[in-house]
Image (tube, coloured by chain):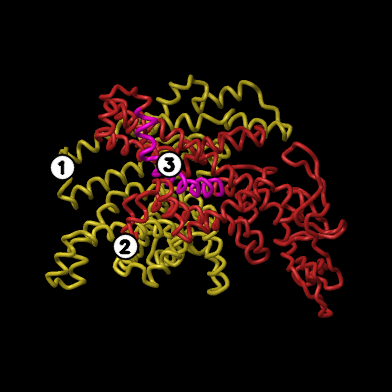
Amino acid sequence: MANPELFKDLSSRRLTWLRFKRHKLALVSGGFLIFLYFIAAFCEFFAPYEPNWRNPKAIFAPPQEIHFIDNQGDFHFRPFVYGYSLTINPETWVREYTQDPQQTHSIYFFAKGQKYQFWNLFSAEHHFITTASGQYLHLFGTDKLGRDIFSRIIYGARISLSLGLIGVALTLVLGVLIGGIAGYVGGRIDNLIQRIIEVLQSIPTLPLWMALSAAVPVHWSPLGVYFSIIVILSFIQWTGLARVVRGRFLALREEDFVVAARLLGASQLRIITRHLLPSFMSHIITTATLAIPGMILAETALSFLGVGLRAPVVSWGVLLQQAQNFQVIVLTPWLLLPGIFVILVVIAFNLLGDGLRDAADPYGGHQS
Amino acid sequence: MATYILKRLLAMIPTLIIISVIVFVLIQLPPGDIISANLAALQQQGMEVSTEQIEALRAQYNLDMPLPLQYFHWVFNFMQGDMGYSIKYEQPVNTLIWERLGYTVIIAVASLLFTWTLAIPIGIYSAVKQYSFGDYLFTVIGLLGLATPSFMLALILMYCAYTWFGISVGGLFSPEYAEAPWSLSKTADLLSHIWIPMIVLGTAGTASIMRVMRANLLDELSKPYVVTARAKGVRPLKLIFKYPVRIAINPFISTIGWLLPTLISGEAIVSIVLNLPTTGPLLLQALLSQDMFLAGSFLMLLSILTVLGMLLSDILLAVVDPRIRYE
């Protein structure tokens, strides 16, 4: 930092925030993620359609483009899309949709559209974007049943993004608890926990996940499957975090301030919660942030293979299940759009985690 | 050294025993078994199956025994090389498994080599030329590689290979070589197919190793001995490769063991997309149809491979790093 005198009166939390703010990429990523989580929380409102609503006029239809200027060259203040006109290719018998300039479907904001149950609490019908009834809007195209990909991605965000967060929360609890016990108690318990971690880590992850999720009964409710997938993913993930926590505990246990607290008669619980945990909380938060993308990718992979979440649940992995072979990329590349969102979210979490790590490291000042 | 290796070998035994218990529990977890699943299918077709027949089938696969006994039966047969019988494929597991496992190992090793030959030089470059254009470029590419689900990368590569080179790239062999005996041209055919799974699998690893290499080397480069050497006029190339690189590379040798399970995991999904004759697709099928001997053998063998990989990396590390004591 340029002038240490300027910073000496600031609290450590304020210093961390100042260091974090210098990471423009991490800042942008954080904003992007908050934005996505916000949309996911209110997905009923932001999605123009219900995830399972079918538009019989559009099967495997390509994305529509938003226009402001119509084919007469007139400018419209209200954006609009062109409707589809269907032709069947006489040689290949493939349905081909072209955007028909005769049909203009205006886009309305905060207007009434399909009815929906908001958070299962009350029914509402206002959408962020929608069209007049009888008209349709497919910004990301439709799938084989004529379902709107854009709406499905927004609904899928709720499942995929929350799964990452809840999964990491569970991982965190398991990892901190078990790693903390190993590091603080030490001795034989530590040895035992170390062996367990080694065993769990030496089973290849994906086959293990596949085996566990294949064991989830078919007749379970979607919510049951959702939580069992979370438990399955956390079941492996905690081991890495537990090692980190253990290492930190071992190192900190002998530090002067901990010894002092012990000599002053502080209880074990107090030492752990007041002295040990705060001193590496930032480190744990960083590790957790970097673990979220792993969770999201794992869910995507499992659902893609058909052993993760199952329809009618909509997650990004479930959506990508439709892109199993490469004819999809040739004929209907927009089915891969959920994958773009997976990539963006994973990158954003990685950048955010990097930023947090640098910000939380009080010795990192020399880097700039 | 020999005692060290022996000790590590002995330490593997309890690990493998616990893994075998976990694997056995895993394949027993799904409710019902393949007999009842097959039975339901037969009854749907209107076939009558008598209870005696069912009991006979169960007895044939030892399914009528209490679970602990089933476990010991399975483990002892496994150790004698008899991995049981795949009910779904109606073949002994042994005939199904070895070739596929071989291809899995080939692909994993190829990806490992690909990862290293790419990641370590790039990591060195990025560290030496920190904050240069190339450093940023590789960081961006690395992030993309890390974030792209492997099956998507596989689909995209397949598409590129199809549109640019006009070759269909599923599988490991062209149709005419699939059943042919091994020959030079078959090996060449394998090499022309293996690069796609190799790139797909290696990419995520390359991205992370690249970053670790960069960070490690940066730590080393700022140490006083490097500054001293530079001040004394040691040539830049020699300066970098003589000490800092050798130290920065150490962690990779110790993590070969950790990389192998990742590669084998990744291989499972990529080979399903690319339709490779490896363990992944068969394992998925076995798990879905509760073909327990097949699934169990796969899980067990893959775990053994991983444990062996870790042993290998421990030994390598002990050879490379004289600071490690053999206690």
> Viewer-nearest of labels 1 and 3?
1
Name of the residue lying farthest toward the top: B66
Q: Which portion, as a residue range, is magenta? A: A271-300
| Residue pointed to by mark 1 | B325
Residue A79 on image: x %, y %: 78, 67
Mark 3 chain: B
Q: Is residue A273 magenta?
A: yes
Query: Is B25 displayed left or right of A122 in the figure?
Result: left
**Residue at point 81% right, 47% down?**
A125
Q: Which chain is painted in red?
A: A
Mark 1 chain: B
Q: Quadrant of residue A132?
A: bottom right
Q: Which numbered disc covers residue B94? A: 3
Q: Which chain is painted in yellow?
A: B
Q: Main secondary structure of the magenta part?
A: helix
Circle 3 crowding by C-alpha within 10 Å: few under 14, some 14–19, many from 20: some
Q: Gap between marks 2 and 1, in whole Å?
A: 27 Å
Q: Is A72 or A21 nearer to us in this picture?
A: A21
Residue A341 on image: x %, y %: 59, 56
**Residue at point 40% right, 38% down?**
A239
| Residue pointed to by mark 2 | B120
